[in-house]
Image (cartoon, rainbow, N blue to C red):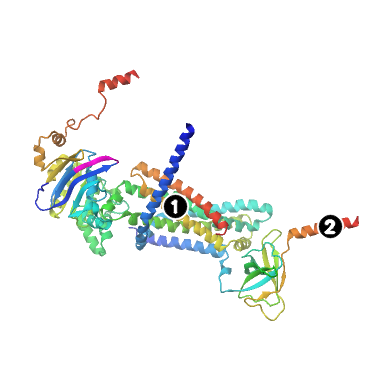
Amino acid sequence: MRIVGIVSGLGRRVIAGVTRLGRAALFLGRLAPGLGIALMRFRLVIQQIYMTGVLTLVIVLVSGAFVGMILALQGYNTLVRYDAQSSLGLLVALSLTRELGPVLTALLFAGRAGSALTAEIGLMKATEQLDGMEMMAVDPLPRVVAPRFWAGWIAVPLLAMIFSAVGIIGAYIVAVGDLGLDGGVFWSQMQSGVSVRDDVLGGLIKSVVFGFVVSWIAVFEGYDAKPTSEGVSRATTRTVVSSSLAILGLDFIMTAFMLRGL
Amino acid sequence: MQGKGSEFAVGLFVVAGLLALAMLALKVGNIHVLSTGDTYSVTADFNDIGSLKPKAPVTVAGVRVGEVARITVNPTTYQAVVTLDIMKKYRFPRDSSASIETAGLLGEQYVSLSPGGSRHDLKNGGKIRITQSAIILEKIISQLLYSKAGHTSGHQ
Amino acid sequence: MEATKGSKPLVAVQGLTFFRDSRAIFQDLSLSVAQGSVTAIMGGSGTGKTTLLSLIGGRLAPAQGTVEVAGELVPTLSRKALFALRRRMGMLFQSSALLTDLDVFENVAFPIREHTRLPEPIIRNLVLMKLELVGLRGARTLYPAELSGGMARRVALARALALDPLMVMYDEPFTGLDPISMAVIVKLIRELNDALGMTSIVVTHDVAEACSIADYIYLLGDGRVIAEGTPADMRKTTAPEVRQFMAGLPDGPVAFHYPAPEYVSDLTVGATV
C-alpha cells in the first residue's frame, strides 16, 4: 500500500510539473505579440535594463573578480605539479568563457534580479495594479511584462561577458602579481588555446539561452502568482529554484552538444 | 519615469558588456588571425601529422605567423594535406620547409617554417615541398627499446 | 426595469448567470443603470458585488444572459472593441490600484499617455485639471506610498476621470476611510457625476452613504436582486431582508449563526470524548 502511495504521489507530481510547463509555454505564446509591441517602445525596456541589469552589475563584478582569483590559485596549485603553470591563463580563460561565466552569471541574476522581477509583477497583481491597467484598456502583457522580459534577456549575456572578462583580469592580477608568472606567457598561452568560435561564442550562446529562460520563468511566476502576500513569496522562491535547475540542466545539454561539435 | 540618468547608466552598461566581449574575442581568444583577407594559404603534405589540429599555430623562429586552416587526406598518396593560413605581411621563399613540432614534451603540436634561399616567394595556393613529419614520442621510444633489445641479443 | 431619469439605460444586465468553481454567484440577475444617474449596488459581503463590476467591465464572461454597456454587448466584443469600450469606462478599485513606481502626476497621466499622442504641455494641463477636481493638485509629486488611503482613492478617481469617461464604477469607495475622507469621497462622487454629466455605479455596503448620494438602489442577495428602488422606497419597505440590511440588525433572515449542529448536543458530544 505504501508503494502505491509513493508511486501515485510521484505521478501526481509529474503531472503537476508537466501542467506547469504547459502553462508557462502558453503564457509565452500570449506574451509573444507583446514582445514586438514592447520593442517599439524601447524606452520602457531601457528603464527595465536599468532596474535589472545595472543593479546586478555590482554583484557580478565582485563575484567575477573573486572567481577568477580563486581559479588562478587553485589552477596554479594543480598545474605546478606537472610543471605546466604556463597554461594557467588558458585554464582560467576556458573555464570562465565556456562554463563559469555564463552559468554563475545566470544563477546570480536569477537570485538578484529574477526573484525581484517575480515579486514586482506578483505584487502588482496582488495590489490590483494589473487589473487597474486592464480596466484602463492597457494590456499589461506588452506594457509591464514584455519590457521586463526583454531587459532580462538582454542583460544576462552582457553580464556574462563582463563576468568572464573581470574574472580573467582577476586571475591575471593573482597569477602575475602574487604567483610570479610571466604576464606575456599568461596571455599568449590563452590566445593560442581559446577559440573565438567554440569558446567565446559558445559561452555567449549559452548565456543568451540562460537569459531567455531565467527571464521567462521570472515573469511567468510573477504573472501566475496567487495575488496574496503568501502567493507572491512562494512564487519568488519558485523562480529561484526553477531557474537554477533549468540553468544547470540546460548547461549540461548544451555542453554535450557543443563538445560533439554540433 | 526615470530620467536621462538611467538611460546613460544603461548605455554605459551596454558599452561595458560589448567591451568585455571585445576583450574576450581579441585579447583572450585569437580572432585577429582569423580575420580573412589578411592571409594567404599554402599547402604542405606530411606523411604523419601526429596530433596536429586545425587552428594550431604556424611559426617562424618561434614567432606566430599564421594558423592551420584545414587538414585533409590526399586520396592517391594517402598523405595528410595541411592547409596553412599565413599573414600577408610575411613572405617566404618557395623552397622553405615545414615541420611539425611539439611545444615542450607533452604540449600541443604546431607547424614550424624554415625559410629557404629561393628568390621567388610562395604565393596563395602554393605548396611547400620539403616537409618533416611529426616526431611521435611513442615510436621513438619503441624504436629505441627495439634496437637496444637487438643489440643485447646480438652480443649474446 | 424602469429607470429613474428617463432615456435609455447606459448599462443593462439581463438574465445574468455566473458560476465560480461551480458555485452560482448570480442566477438570473437583471438590473439597469440609467444614464446620468448614481446607482448604488448594495449587499452583504460575498454577494458578488465586485464580480458584477468585473462582468460589466468585461473582465469576466457570464455563463448565461447579456451585459450591455452603451448599446454594446460586452461578452461578445473582440479584445480590441472591448478595450475601446473600456476607454470610456473609469473604474475605482477598493485598493486604489495606483502604480507604485510612478508619482501622482504620472499615475493620472498614465491613461492619457497610453491612449493619446498629445504634446507634453497639453498632458500637463489635463492632469492638473483632473487633480484640481479632486483637490490634490498640490500633491502631484508624491508617490502612492506617501498617500493616505483617502488621498490615494482621490488620485485613483482623478485617474479614472483622465479620459473623460461616460461612466465610473466605484468598488467599495467608502471602505476603510476616516469620516472626513469619507465625506470628501461622497461629495466628489455626487458632484462629479452631475458636473461632468457622467453615470456612476457605486458598489457598497455602507447604507447611510449610499442612501445620501444614490438615485436608485439595488439590493443583492442569493445571486439575485432582492429589492430595488429609490433610497426613500428602500427605507419604507417592510420586506424583512431589506429591513435587516437597511437597519443593520444582527439577526434576521440572514442568520447570526452559521449552520451548525444543535448547541447542547454538540457540547455533550465534546464532553464525552
Q: Distance between the residues labelled 2 and 1?
A: 64 Å
Residue depicted at x 67% and y 76%? B92
Is residue B61 among the parts visible in the rendering? Answer: no
Circle on res. A214 = 1
Residue A183, given in percent of the width and then of the height, sits at: 61, 61
Residue C222, given in percent of the width and then of the height, sits at: 20, 38
Residue depicted at x 77% and y 60%? B140
Answer whether residue C25 is magenta in the image.
yes
Tell me the magenta residue range.
Answer: C21-28
| Res A44 quadrant in image | bottom left
Question: How would you rate the neighbour count of disc 1 (Cα within 10 Å): few for under 14, some for 14-19, many for 20 or more?
Answer: many
**Which amino acid type corresponds to the residue marked 2 in the rendered image?**
Lys
Residue depicted at x 57% and y 53%? A69
Task: Give SS at disc 1.
Answer: helix
Residue B62, given in percent of the width and then of the height, sits at: 68, 68
Residue A17, given in percent of the width and then of the height, sits at: 43, 45
Task: Give SS at disc 2.
Answer: helix
